[in-house]
Image (cartoon, rainbow, N blue to C red):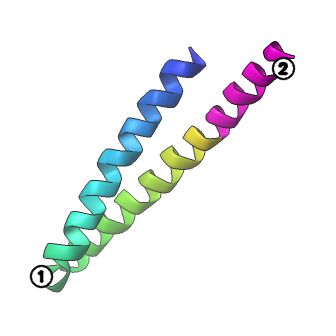
Amino acid sequence: MIKALFWGLLILSAILLIKILNILIFDFNRLTEYGMGYLSGLMILFLTSSSLSVVLGLKKFKKNKKAEH
């Protein structure tokens, strides 16, 4: 279960990062206030999903290291 959640969050983080970079590279000059709000919301979602993915990944890999010893 943790493995599936880890990979799902990792894929979600990658998709969000691509969307954020796409907006920053190609559409930053045209952003309105609402667009900046959308961009900041995407950044919050990215930070949340990536940090959860890191926490779950560390938990998963620590569990695997203990099983190896």
* Figure check: 50 above or below 28: above
Q: State yes or no: residue 21 in magenta.
A: no
- Amino acid carrying label 1: it is Arg
Residue 30, by quadrant, is bottom left
Q: Position of residue 44 (x, y in %)?
A: 46, 58
Q: Which secondary structure lies at badge 2?
A: helix
Residue flagged by tag 2: what amino acid is it? Lys
Magenta part, dominant SS:
helix
Q: Circle 1 — which element?
A: helix
**Neighbourhood count class around disc 1 (C-alpha, 10 Å): few under 14, some 14–19, many 20 upward:** few
- Drawn side of residue 23 relative to residue 6, left or right: left
> In this picture, is 25 found above or below 9?
below
- Is residue 63 shown left or right of residue 4? right
The residue lying at 33 percent from left, 51 percent from top is 16
* Magenta span of residues: 55-69
Q: Which residue is mark 2?
A: 66
**Which residue is pictured at 69% across the width and 36% down the height?**
58
Q: In the displayed orientation, state which residue is furthest to the bottom.
A: 29
User: Which residue is found at the position 46% from the left and 35% from the top?
Assistant: 9
Q: Where residue 53 appears, x then y in whole percent?
A: 55, 39
